[in-house]
Image (tube, rainbow, N blue to C red):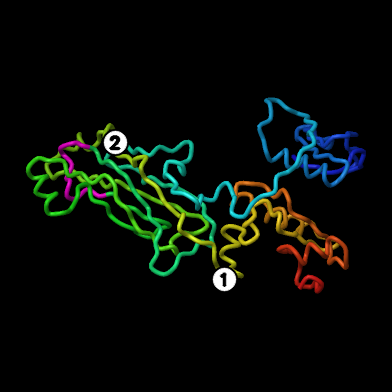
Amino acid sequence: RHGIVIGHPGEQVGGMTLPETDKPLLRIIANPANPAYKLLLIVGKNDTALRMAAWRLTRGNFAPQTATLDVESQTIPVGKAYDAPRWIPTDRPVRLSELLRKDQSPTVSGVWHEPLRIAFRAAPDLYLWDGETIPLQVGYRFPSESWINEDKSLLSVTLNGTFLNNLAMNKQGPLEKVWRHLGGDARQERFTIPLAPYLIYGDNQLSMYFNVVPKDDVPCSVLLNNNIKSRITDDSWIDLSKTRHFSLLPNLSYFVGASFPFSRLADYSQTTLMLPADPSETQVATLLNLAARSGNATGTALANNRVVLGMPTGGADLQSLRERDVLAVTALDQQAFN
């Protein structure tokens, strides 16, 4: 099978000798046990070199057909609190267009269509004082066809399965209604929805559906026309700049959804990962899976964490336990950890 081998130059791993190198090295080779599969070698002469090689691997941007790369010496940047690339910024309004996937469009076609679903992640400890809300401005355009029932057509907005509002196609004030009956344009093109802070999770999905209702006498052939377009405009945004970071811990839901509070610094530069002195394969796999879940939640790899095997009795490892957050993988019968 495919595999990843991590070690020092000249080290024997599974009957294979890792290549000699002065620089951190990344290399893909055929698996000696079965050439149909590949091995990724991560080689460095010390822990610092191995960390550099692994960090370079997470950066990507390799030339096509690259099989070997000597990694140049580099300083791995230390993260800042709440700088996870996948977490929505809280220092400015964020346009909904920024949150769309590359394959998504803010425009939908036809009378019947899938809702426009916009996924975004946020720090799970966002907090507001009682009575304060998070503004969500939705700019939208319905089609202009004459066969649309403008009184019944609505834009339905939900967040994480919670209904927020039905936004009317036209403005609803009495003067606007008179103006529309006189032939004027009374279209409502934007609306601000106040969001209670508890509606924002670590992992969120905003859903918007244009419920285009035809007039009663419209022929079916018109309804099957997919050329009509409804769209969310670029002046749509959500603004979390008034939120604060405050929460009561521990909170297991934060950890499950966003690896929080360890992911507060997404590179885990404030976290020590602990394993037993002689960890089992399952325990190592569990730790790697936790690291992968955190990377998926934040959009960045664990680059500055510390790993400790066994309960330290002194030195830098013991000091790191006193100064850092600790995430330990253990078993119930290992009393030193429990």
Q: In the rendered structure, does residue 150 fall within the stretch colored magenta?
A: yes
Residue 119 horizontal/vertical position (percent): 47, 49
Pick the residue in front: 276 or 73.
73
Secondary structure category for the residue under label 2? strand
Which comes before the other along the chain, label 2 or label 1?
2
Query: Which residue corresponds to the image point at 76% horizontal and 68% vertical from the top-left?
Result: 331
Tell me which segment is drawn in magenta.
144-154
Residue 293 visible here: no
Image quadrant assignment for residue 3: top right
Query: Which residue corresponds to the image point at 76% horizontal and 29% vertical from the top-left?
Result: 67
Residue 15 horizontal/vertical position (percent): 91, 41
| 59 relative to 233 in the view: left or right | right
Q: Dominant secondary structure of the magenta stretch?
A: loop
Cβ atoms under marks 2 and 1 closer than 8 Å? no
Q: Give the residue type at disc 1.
A: Leu
Q: In the rendered structure, does residue 64 fall within the stretch colored magenta?
A: no
Quadrant (top left, top right, bottom left, bottom right) of the N terminus: top right
Tell me, for residue 281, which label it has, or none: none
**Furthest residue to the left?**
182
The answer for how far apart the CA atoms under marks 2 and 1 are is 46 Å
Residue beneath label 1, please?
Answer: 248
Residue 274 horizontal/vertical position (percent): 77, 61
Residue beneath label 2, please?
Answer: 229
Pick the residue in front: 75 or 32.
75
| 313 relative to 150 in the view: left or right | right
Q: Give the residue type at disc 2.
A: Lys
Of tags 2 and 1, the one toward the viewer is 1
Residue 335 horizontal/vertical position (percent): 80, 74
For mark 2, does the 10 Å Cα neighbourhood hold few (<14), some (14 to 19), or many (20 or more) residues? some
Secondary structure category for the residue under label 1? loop
Quadrant (top left, top right, bottom left, bottom right) of the C terminus: bottom right
